Amino acid sequence: MSKFLIRLDDIHPRMNHDNFDRLINLLSKYTIQGILGVIPDNQDPKLMIQNHDLNFWDQMKLLEDRGYWIAQHGYQHIYDSNDGGVLNLNKQSEFAGHSYDVQKRKLAEGKTILESKGLNPKVFMAPSHSYDHTTIKVIKQLGYAITDGFGLFPKKKDGVLYIPQLFASPKHIGVGLYTICLHTDQMKENDFNRLENHIKKDKLNYISPNQIETYQIKENKFLWIFIDSFFGTLFKYITRIKRNVIK
């Protein structure tokens, strides 16, 4: 049976607070927690939707205490590279293509900001799903997992836990853990209704971040590793075809 994990992208003090609060209230109604992709120092003008929320960081801490995981969603969300990274889904990046020193500075400064607000980030969430092998090297040093990539199950590779992210809405394939990627700034009435209807029907299959490792593929499960790799490769090429970025 498919399991579902919620992740929210582009969370920062000037986001669409009305949509964010509505979604958090919806998830609270069904006792669901997810991963919050918090931008430490947002400088992306496209994401500045509403006025600065003076209670933003207190709210993030409260949600973390309730079981949400905090993900470091980049640093300033500024795209200064055209490198698609290892996933090659978007030709824009804040990290991929930059040197080790540049990436380490951005990631370290971003983590310092989050920790100064009393948060304990556990995961790295790359803007535009774009990161490269240098990024992975740095986040391994920071002790982060990665919420991204293709596959059916969470798995560790070279000491880094990867939590696959395939869809922007619930889809049943019959097996696997699927991270549902939501951008609350852009959600419309139909999006809220569709999500709640699915949760009503499938509440028991929504998991919290603290349950992720329960579904992790163990290194000695060779058959499941093969199945995960096969479907991961299939999803990767289907996604690249749809986005016309075959490489």
Image (cartoon, helix red, strand yellow):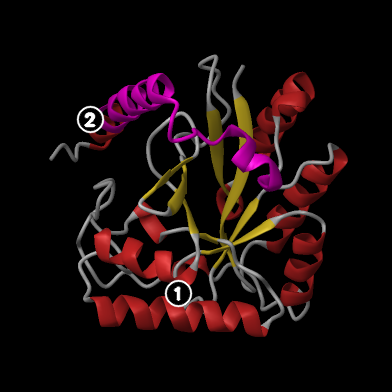
* Residue 220 horizontal side relative to residue 4, left or right: left
Q: Residue at x 65, y 33 (%)?
A: 190
Q: Label 1 is placed on what type of residue?
A: Tyr
Helix, strand, or loop for circle 2? helix
Q: Is residue 237 visible?
A: yes
Main SS class of the magenta portion in the image: helix
Q: Quick one: quadrant of the C terminus?
A: top left
Q: Residue at x 46, y 28 (%)?
A: 152
Looking at the picture, how far across and down is residue 87, in whole percent? 28, 46
Which of the 4 quarters of the picture holds residue 17?
bottom right
Looking at the picture, how far across and down is residue 237, in whole percent? 24, 29
Looking at the picture, how far across and down is residue 28, in whole percent? 83, 45
Helix, strand, or loop for circle 1? loop
Residue extent of the magenta highlight: 209-237
Is disc 1 surrounded by few (<14), some (14 to 19) or many (20+) residues within 10 Å? many
Q: Quick one: quadrant of the N terminus?
A: top right
Which of the 4 quarters of the picture holds residue 49?
bottom right
Between 166 and 177, the residue placed more toward the observer is 177
Tag shown at residue 228: none
Q: Label 2 is placed on what type of residue?
A: Ile
Rounded to the nearest angstrom, the CA distance separating label 1 from label 2 is 29 Å
Is disc 2 surrounded by few (<14), some (14 to 19) or many (20+) residues within 10 Å? few
Between 136 and 41, the residue placed more toward the observer is 136
Residue 212 in magenta stretch? yes
* Residue 79 horizontal side relative to residue 51, left or right: left
- The residue labelled by disc 1 is 75
Q: Residue at x 45, y 74 (%)?
A: 75
Q: Is residue 188 visible?
A: no
The nearer-to-camera label among 1 and 2 is: 1
Task: Please count the marks in the image.
Answer: 2
- The residue labelled by disc 2 is 241
Between 165 and 228, the residue placed more toward the observer is 228
